[in-house]
Image: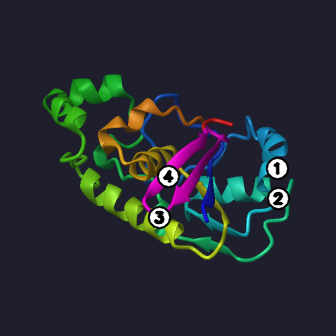
Amino acid sequence: MATQLYLLRHGSTDVESGALVGSTDVGLDGKGLARFGRLSRRLEDVEVWYCSPMLRTRQTLDELQRHISTGQEIRYDDRLREIDFGRWEMQCFADISKADPGLIDSWTRYTDFVFPGGEEVAGFCERVGTMLELFMVHDAEKIGVITHGGVIRTLICLALGISVRNYLLFDVQPASLTVLELFDKGGVLKGLDL
């Protein structure tokens, strides 16, 4: 039997649009949260919830709980954190390309890249992959996950069996829902940016 994985990206933050926000623990700006009311019907039957421990995801969970009962205990898991962008945290691409032009080409190759002073992409993908493995063998048929855009994009790539270099092909907006149907050997993308 397939497992339905409901991936909810946290709401928008008060950080400048286009800035890389990974390990910086910022809060929500309160915009776009009404969307959760519209999504609540799809999420009412979720049997278990997992959540990144970051402030923005916990605040998203609080807002979601205003619309539905999440029932049992929420399982916070560090593996659901966004990637650590290191010294590029809170910077936009234009600033990064001026400060580190030599690293931009390496970044586009992605899978062997290490963010300066931050996390290696391969390690990030590995930790996200361990969550996918957990979800694929989970007893629950409907699992909810509140996490970050990069985590969701990576989960999509891993579940579909495509290279994580393609992660930017998936537009995962703040306060949006992505649905994956998981089987023994992989997954099917059932909904994006709902």
The amino acid type found where label 4 is placed reads Gly
Chain part drawn in magenta: 174-191
Rounded to the nearest whole Å, what is the CA distance between mark 1 and mark 3?
28 Å
Label 2 crowd (10 A; few <14 / some 14-19 / many >=20): some
- Residue, disc 1: 40
Q: Are marks 1 and 3 in contact (CB under 8 Å)?
A: no
Rounded to the nearest whole Å, what is the CA distance between mark 1 and mark 2?
6 Å
- Residue, disc 4: 187
2 vs 4, front mark: 4
The amino acid type found where label 1 is placed reads Ser
Label 1 crowd (10 A; few <14 / some 14-19 / many >=20): some
On the picture, is 14 further left or further right than 153? right
The amino acid type found where label 3 is placed reads Asp
Residue 184, labelled with which disc? 3
State yes or no: residue 113 in magenta: no
Tell which circle, 3 or 2, labels the residue nearer the N-terminal end.
2
